[in-house]
Each structure stands twice: as structure tokens, then as C-alpha cells.
Image (cartoon, rainbow, N blue to C red):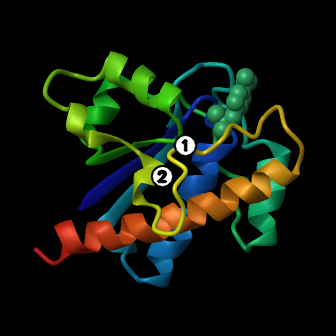
């Protein structure tokens, strides 16, 4: 079992989008029995809430339903449980390091490290921007999700 957690600030825009995109990709590759996928936020603003309507709409346009996800906050035990704890931006990364149990720091990575066709290291926060930001976020997340699945297959599933 390979366990992947996507983390952003609110867990209502970027990380539920990444969870939905990656879940779809894993299903397409019939690897769902070998993966556990979840998302969380570093802050408590939106606990229990459904994803932002704009994120839901952008995902729906690509055939991804994230409407049933609910916001939750990342906790230290998440880093004990998940093999990959993937931060959407550097602020999320720093906030995760602050709650990280000693010795597990290497599980925390920037998600965009896995992108194969772009140089950006952070997924920009679309919350205060226009609707177009959500499509840009999806493009970036789709790229990194592909790279992540390749990395997991190479490093963990063929072992
Ligand atoms: P997310 O976006 O971190 O991608 O879920 C945000 C959601 C809410 C807020 C900021 C970013 N907020 O300030 O409430």
C-alpha cells in the first residue's frame, strides 16, 4: 500500500482538486487497491466544508467529482501514516515541517517537484483570484499527478 496525502492551506481548493485528479489517474491505471489517497489543510478555516464551488466546477468540466470531499486539518499523525505528504506551496511545506514528528521530514515534499513539463515549484492559491485560476491550477496538478504516479510505480510498486 502506498499512501499519498495532498496538503494546501484551506483544503477546499488545491488539495481536494489534487486528490480528485490523482484518484482518477490511479483508477485509470487500475492501481486503486494499492493506494490510499487523501487531502488536508494546514489551517482550520474550512473544516467540514465541501470544496469551493469554483474548484468543484473546474473539476467537473474535466469529469472529476470532488463534491463529496470535506475539509479537514492536517495533523502530526498524518505524517506518520502517509508515505508522500505533498505540499502545494512553500508556506504549506513550512507549516507541515512545524508539526512533523522528528525523523519523518523527508516524507514532506513540494507536489510540483513531480511535474515533468513545467518549472513552477508551487501551485498558486486560486482562492482570491478569478475563476481562470482554477483551470491553471488543474493544468499544473494534472502534470504533477502524472509524474507522481510514475515515481510511485518506479520506486514502490515494482519493488
Ligand atoms: P486552498 O485555498 O488552500 O487551495 O484550499 C484557500 C482556501 C481558503 C483560504 C485560502 C486559500 N482562506 O483564506 O480561507
In the rendered view, would you say 92 is above or below 155? above
Q: Where is residue 148 in the image (x, y as percent from the top left)?
A: 39, 64
- Of residue 128 and residue 122, the one placed in the foreground of this image is 122
Q: Which residue lies furthest to the front in this view?
A: 119
Helix, strand or loop for disc 1: loop
Q: How far apart are marks 2 and 1 (CA)?
A: 6 Å
| Ligand 1 falls in quadrant | top right
What residue do we see at 33% from left, 34% from top? Answer: 78
At horizontal 45% and vertical 68% (from top left) the residue drawn is: 116
The residue singled out by tag 2 in the image is 112
Q: Count neighbours of disc 2 (C-alpha within 10 A) and say few if under 14, some if 14 to 19, many if 20 or more.
A: many
Residue 90: give x, y in percent of width and height.
Answer: 48, 31
Mark 2 and mark 1 in contact? Answer it, CB < 8 Å: yes
Judged left or right of residue 6, residue 104 is left
The part of the image, by quadrant, that contains residue 21 is: bottom right
Of the pair 92 and 113, the residue shown nearer to us: 113
Q: Is residue 10 left or right of residue 38?
A: right
Residue 66 in sight from this viewpoint:
no
Please give the residue where the numbered disc 1 appears in the rendered image.
122
Residue 154 percent coordinates (x, y): 22, 73
Q: Is residue 140 left or right of residue 89?
A: right
The image quarter in which residue 15 lies: top right
Secondary structure beneath disc 2?
A: helix
Q: What is the x, y in percent for residue 18? A: 57, 55
Amino acid at each position: 500500500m502506498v499512501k499519498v496525502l495532498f496538503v494546501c492551506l484551506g483544503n477546499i481548493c488545491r488539495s481536494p482538486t489534487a486528490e480528485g485528479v490523482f484518484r482518477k489517474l490511479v483508477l485509470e491505471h487500475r492501481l486503486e487497491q494499492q493506494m490510499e489517497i487523501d487531502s488536508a489543510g494546514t489551517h482550520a478555516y474550512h473544516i467540514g466544508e465541501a470544496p469551493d464551488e469554483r474548484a468543484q466546477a473546474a473539476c467537473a468540466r474535466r469529469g472529476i467529482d470532488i463534491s463529496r470531499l470535506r475539509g479537514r486539518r492536517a495533523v502530526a499523525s498524518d505524517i506518520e501514516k502517509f508515505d508522500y505528504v505533498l505540499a502545494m506551496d512553500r508556506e504549506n511545506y513550512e507549516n507541515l515541517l512545524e508539526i512533523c514528528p522528528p525523523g519523518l521530514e523527508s516524507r514532506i515534499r513540494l507536489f510540483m517537484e513531480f511535474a515533468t513539463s513545467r518549472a513552477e515549484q508551487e501551485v498558486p492559491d486560486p482562492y482570491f483570484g478569478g475563476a481562470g485560476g482554477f483551470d491553471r491550477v488543474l493544468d499544473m496538478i494534472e502534470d504533477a499527478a502524472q509524474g507522481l504516479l510514475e515515481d510511485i510505480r518506479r520506486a514502490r510498486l515494482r519493488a
